[in-house]
Amino acid sequence: VQLVESGGGLVQAGDSLRLSCTASGDTICIDAMAWYRQAPGKERELVAVVNFGTYYADSVKGRFTISRDKAKNMLYLQMNSLKPEDTAVYYCNAAPIDRDCSRDDWWGQGTQVTVSS
């Protein structure tokens, strides 16, 4: 499975961005999908997950929306009311449905989101 993110950029506080992740390859092997982010000097953190339901980190709840289009093999992250503390590299993540598909999650290369104050 290959994951490619797009949609990052430089925006001002209060603006919106929509990140996209395109999955290709053995997409039938994908179970849950998620967005992570990593700010400079910090550990990578979970932002949102989608599978049968959704989960959001407290820091983005009410501002970000994760969605998935299985037919198009796409994952999205709609980010509204962006704050400078949302500045990070955002990574698309996919979990394998079983170990026959993969022992490890798949990751995209990341897309930079920078929010200026």
Image: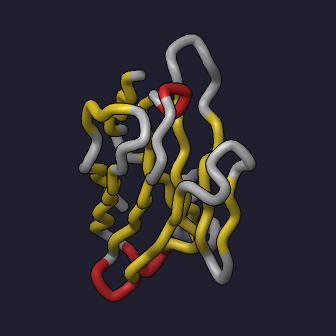
Residue at screen point 43% across, 59% down: 77
* Rendered location of residue 63, percent (x, y): 56, 55
Residue at screen point 45% across, 53% down: 80
* Rendered location of residue 72, percent (x, y): 28, 81
Give left or right: position of 110 versus 50.
Answer: left
* Rendered location of residue 40, percent (x, y): 50, 15
Outermost residue, bottom side: 71
Q: Quadrant of the N terminus?
A: bottom left
| Nearer to us in this view, 48 or 79 | 79
Residue at screen point 68% across, 43% down: 59
Q: Is residue 7 above or below residue 28?
A: above
Give left or right: position of 71 versus 64.
Answer: left
| Nearer to us in this view, 3 or 49 | 49
| Nearer to us in this view, 60 or 13 | 13
Give left or right: position of 42 versus 88.
Answer: right
Q: Quadrant of the C terminus?
A: top left
